[in-house]
Image: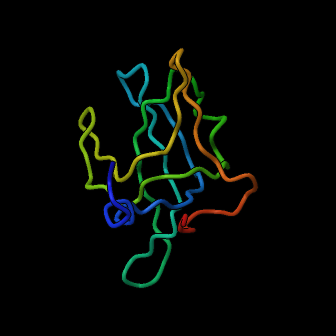
Amino acid sequence: MIGYDDFSKVELKTAHVLQAERVLDSEKLLRLTLDVGDKNEAGEPVSRIVLAGIGKQYEPETLIGKDIVIVANLEPRSLMGEISNGMIVAATDNEGTISILQPDKSIGGGWKIK
């Protein structure tokens, strides 16, 4: 078990999927371009790239326009030569079927999950 203080360090946020595409030479990796409410120094919105191993069960075009949940404060990680800046939140059943967690209505990206 972990304590509440450890759990409170995890930053869960909503993310709006702007683009989704397959990663070249990978059967399961998808590259998601997300709006998670990030802004640059000028206060302009900037997107974030997250790579997810969901390509065997999700076609990229079905994700565009959806709101999903991500872990927003993970250290960047290199996967197949590309940098992922977060992790989608999903459940997997006993047969290995992946189900992405989504808000029950469209609320856009950048909202903190409490």
Q: Position of residue 101 (x, y in %)?
A: 59, 44
- Who's the residue at 49% across and 29% down the image? 54
Identify the coloring. Answer: rainbow
Percent across and percent down for residue 70 are: 48, 52
Question: Residue at position x 46%, y 34% from top?
Answer: 30
Q: Is residue 98 above or below residue 52?
A: above
The answer to whether residue 9 is left or right of residue 77 is: right
Name which residue lies at 38% across and 52% down: 86
Total numbered badges shown on the rendered structure = 0
Q: Residue 52 location, x and y as percent?
A: 43, 37
* Residue 78: quadrant of the picture: top left
Q: Is residue 54 above or below residue 56?
A: below
Q: Residue at x 33, y 59 (%)?
A: 3
**Corner quadrant of residue 71:** bottom left
Residue projecting furthest to the bottom: 42
List the single residue furthest toward the top: 95
Q: Quadrant of the C terminus?
A: bottom right
In this rendering, position of residue 21 left or right of residue 107? left
Place of residue 8 in the rendered image (x, y in percent of width and height, measured from the top left): 39, 66
